[in-house]
Image (cartoon, rainbow, N blue to C red):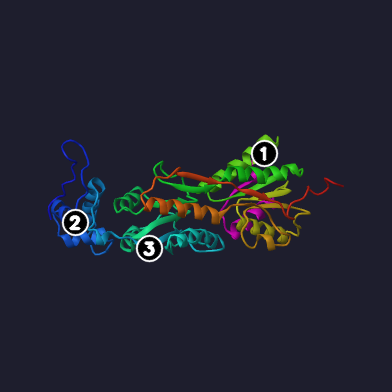
Amino acid sequence: MTSADTSPSADGARHEPLTTAQLAERAGVSMATVSKVVNGRAEVAAETREIVEELIRRHGYRRQKKAGEPAPMLEVVFHELAGPYPVEIVKGAQQIAGEHGLAVAVTQLQGRHTPGLGWVEGVLARRPTAVITVFSALTDAQASQLRSRRIPFVHLDPTEEPPPECPSVGASNWSGGMSATRHLLQLGHRRVAVVAGPPYALASRARLDGYRAAMDIGGAPVDETLVRVAGFRVEDGIAATRELLRLPEPPTAVFACNDGAALGVYRAAAEAGLRVPRDLSVVGFDDLFPSNWLTPPLTTVRQPLAAMAASAAAMAVALARGDDLDQKRVELSTELVVRDSTAPPRGAAD
């Protein structure tokens, strides 16, 4: 195998994309090997794959016309399939996909928030019309591979700030965190705790920042002993609330940065013999099942997940058609939904 010619043309310009034959010649490999790399097949040596991929990144790739037809499929990629969150996402994506004659395929990353080895090869082999990544992020190399094969992608509720050229859809997490905290302050609470999500997640950092801003504006300086950076699971809410309730001066209210953690707050409060909201007010975030069916029904910030997914799907379909997007950053509004889990602190109305 000879070394690949990865140098640009003498004038620095990028000309027509290379065909399979041209890639094979420059990489010093067979056309069959190039075809395996292009289509995401696994049986190629890592060094050879990287040489071919580098050529494609630099020069582009021109498929034969018939082979280039994408599958009529919108692929939605989750970090994991658990709880009602992915159900709402699929509903929204299906709405738009159906309008354009596309099926929705669902894949998951086994709990990872960045796809592992082999993920992008699978996408290239399936060749969907477009990809939506949910609560995850692509590496630069993975994004480059999808672009080089003309497979558009959109980030939905990304875990980190996407590069400027990558379209994304999110929610107004900062204002949602502020409205949740401000609601508790307006009820008269001053010992307001927060059970934040994982620090790697853009949404959880924004909700925590909204909490801090509301406390500052409300004249209630944040007591750092009331801040618990945990996670989005029920177990995280239980563990964090147990710690909070053991404080010499425990909180009278808790803002949990998602409904799962809020359910954990309910459980820990019950263990301690406390009643919601008589002894402890609770606000969640998401407004997902079973929030409205808890006892008492949960006050929470509604995140429009289905609408977010529909927006991401519409963007992905537009990119697949070759259309320009009006905007690459879409942020949909959240809304505080007041139910029965919040009340003035005990004794305030006595």
> Which numbered disc, 1 or 2, marks the residue that appears first in the sequence?
2
What kind of residue is marked 1? Answer: Met
* Residue pictured at 41% horizontal, 51% vertical: 318
Q: To which residue does mark 3 refer?
A: 72
Local packing at callout 1 (Cα closer than 10 Å; few below 14, some 14-19, many 20+) is many
User: Which label sits on residue 312?
Assistant: none
- The numbered mark at residue 215 is 1
Q: Residues within 10 Å of mark 3 (few under 14, many from 20)?
A: some
Identify the main secondary structure in magenta.
helix
In the depicted view, which residue is nearer to us: 2 or 104? 104
Residue at the image point whose x is 33% and y is 60% from the top = 70
Which residue position holds label 2? Answer: 20
Q: Is 98 situated above or below 299?
A: below
Q: Where is residue 183 drawn, in percent x and y?
A: 71, 45
Contact? badges 1 and 3 (CB < 8 Å): no
Among numbered discs 3 and 2, the one appearing first in the sequence: 2
Secondary structure of the residue carrying numbered label 1: helix
Residue 191 appears in view: no
Residue 238 belongs to magenta span? yes
Q: Is residue 235 visible?
A: yes
Marks 1, 3: nearer the viewer: 3
Q: Secondary structure at mark 2?
A: helix
Quarter assignment of residue 58: top left
- Which residue range is magenta in the image? 224-246
Residue 16 or 273: which is nearer the viewer? Answer: 16
Separation of residues labelled 3 and 2 (CA atoms): 24 Å
Q: Is residue 304 magenta?
A: no
